[in-house]
Amino acid sequence: MSGSEWVVEAAGCEPDRLRNLETLAALFAHLIAELDLHPVLPAVWHQFPSPGGITGMVLLAESHLTVHTFPEHGTLCLNLFCCRPRARWNFEEGLRTFLAASAVEVRFLERPYGETEG
């Protein structure tokens, strides 16, 4: 058995959207609904003083979803870890829609449990 983890970097994002808690909460809600994830607690958010961004986390029954935004650079870092294999969400389209991202890099990591070769 193994888990699925996505490490996502987005650039060219609209800075005002990266500072907007409602926009990021909507992004999380959309992603959670489309992947049928199960939050165990409400999201926790920290908004840094202007011109800073936002850090957010949702603890999931499947593991976690986190985001860190950098409006001063127009960038975002997002991490989704699921303890079981899961279909890939369309991060490119989602981040273009919610944040106007012009470039999205997605790294996928399979997280094996138990013994590993080595």
Image: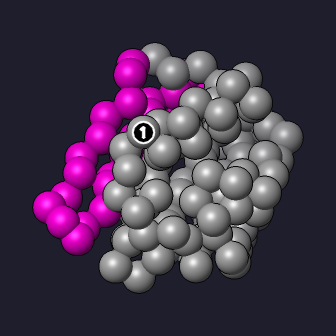
Residue 56 is a magenta residue: yes
- Report the span colored magenta: 41-63
Percent x, y of residue 111: 68, 51
User: The residue under label 1 is which amino acid type?
Assistant: Glu
How does the figure colour the protein chain or chains?
Answer: one colour
Q: How many marks?
A: 1
Quadrant hosting residue 106: bottom right
Q: Quadrant of the N terminus?
A: top right
For the point 64% across and 69% down, the residue is 101
Q: Residue furthest right?
A: 87
Q: From what the image shows, is residue 99 above or below residue 106?
A: above
Name the spot of residue 84 as percent of width and height, x first.
73, 34
Quadrant of the image containing the C terminus: bottom right
Instruction: Tell me if mark 1 has few (under 14), some (14-19) or many (20+) residues whose alpha carbon lies within 10 angstroms of its own.
Output: few
* 38 horizontally vs 85: left or right: left
Mark 1 secondary-structure assignment: helix
Residue that badge 1 annotates: 22
In depth, the one of 22 and 108 nearer the eye is 22
**Residue at 62% across / 52% down in the picture?**
98
Residue at horizontal 71%, vertical 43%?
3
Q: Quadrant of residue 52?
A: bottom left
Q: Is residue 57 left or right of residue 9?
A: left
Question: Residue 70 at what x, y percent from top left?
Answer: 37, 71
Name the residue rendered at 23%, 71% in the picture. 51
The front one of 89 and 2 is: 89
Q: Compared with residue 60, is residue 3 higher up or lower down, i.e. above or below?
A: below
| Residue 38, picture quadrant | top right
For residue 55, above or below residue 70: above
Q: Residue 14: x and y, percent?
A: 51, 69
Q: Please tell me whether residue 55 belongs to the stretch shown in magenta.
A: yes
Give the side of residue 36 with respect to residue 52, left or right: right
Q: Is residue 84 above or below residue 40?
A: below
